[in-house]
Amino acid sequence: MNHANYRGRLAPSPTGFLHLGHARTFWVAQQRAKENGGALILRNEDLDSTRYKMEFVPAMLEDLRWFGFEWSEGPDVGGKFAPYNQSERMNFYRAALEKLRAGNFVYPCNCSRKDIQAATRAPHANDDDEPIYPGTCRGKGDKWRVTSDKDLARAVMSPVTRHASLRFRVPDGEIIFFHDGNFGAQKFIAGKDFGDFVVWRGDGVPAYQLACVTDDAAMQITEVVRGADLLVSTARQILLYHALGLTPPKFFHCDLMRDENGQRLAKRHDALSLRKLRELGETPESLRRKW
């Protein structure tokens, strides 16, 4: 890696208060950017309007700065790759989707999450929230084929397909290898460890996988630091990078922080939110010492 060109990022979503697990992973990202003499970028992943609340955005910025994070580009400071709020970057996502459509990598799917969970195939792992898609809508024939922007709009929004989502067709049996900066060599098999995944939701919003790849490429991120629960997502995203003709960044996945019952921390763990810990008199230094 060319250290002078290192670009890392923090990519929180405003769906709740940041907790100690976020802080530890983000701290690793910041330290790696500093060690490489590079830049750290803050991106506000505010696409999911069904989950995020506007008041969480200033709280997120405040908590990050309180903990000691510093970024050179972001929604509050600007930068040459603005905007840094995902909700303002829809033109990037539509362009990426058009490339996938042109390459026949996507197809409409009107299966509900309940339909998929009822299928016999189970999720890949406890930390991976996406069930393996059984391929119900994969071979619907020519009437499902998307050949133009108008067809794409009809496929996604028409009542016939009940506001279908769009899925990426994974190459069954293809082995995805990548080297993780923390866990070493990784290997996943498309169609076995994960199935066809959603890239565009039925409500007209890009899914996490597509938005993440599009933004990391556009913002010239050279290394993605995130939690180990996203190792399988990295395999999915590498397929997207290749389909879009892009070079994947390097990856560094951090161990997850867990509660006393062994469950990974989530935003429902209010007692371990940075905001609550600050109210209890903790300092960033005291919290980092406990790591």
Image: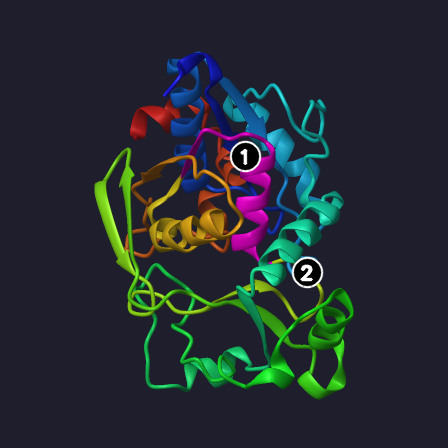
Residue lying at the far right of the rendered structure: 150
In the rendered view, would you say 6 is above or below 55?
above
Between residue 148 and residue 209, name the one nearer to us.
148
Between residue 183 and residue 188, name the one nearer to us.
188
Residue 290 located left or right of residue 102: left
Residue 159 image position (x, y, % from top left): 75, 85
Q: Which residue is drawn at 60% across and 35% down?
A: 218
Q: Closer to the N terminus: mark 2 or mark 1?
A: 2
- In the image, which is nearer the foreground, mark 2 or mark 1? 2
Residue 96 image position (x, y, % from top left): 63, 51
The residue to which callout 2 is attached is 205
Residue 246 located left or right of residue 230: right
SS at mark 1 in the image: helix
Say whether residue 71 is magenta. Answer: no
Say whether residue 208 is magenta. Answer: yes
Mark 1, Cα crowd under 10 Å, few <14 / some 14-19 / many 20+, is few
Q: Give the range drawn in magenta.
A: 207-225
Residue 231 located left or right of residue 203: left
Residue 267 image position (x, y, % from top left): 50, 51
Q: Residue at x 35, y 55 (%)?
A: 232
Q: Toward which corner of the image does residue 153 lie, by quadrant?
A: bottom right
In the rendered view, would you say 228 is above or below 58?
below
The residue to which callout 1 is attached is 279
Q: Which residue is drawn at 28% across and 33% down?
A: 181
SS at mark 2 in the image: loop
Q: Toward which corner of the image does residue 64 lie, by quadrant?
A: top right
Could you tell me the amino acid type at mark 2?
Answer: Val
Could you tell me the amino acid type at mark 1?
Answer: Glu
Mark 2, Cα crowd under 10 Å, few <14 / some 14-19 / many 20+, is some
In the rendered image, the quadrant that contains the C terminus is top left
Label 2 vs label 1: CA separation?
36 Å
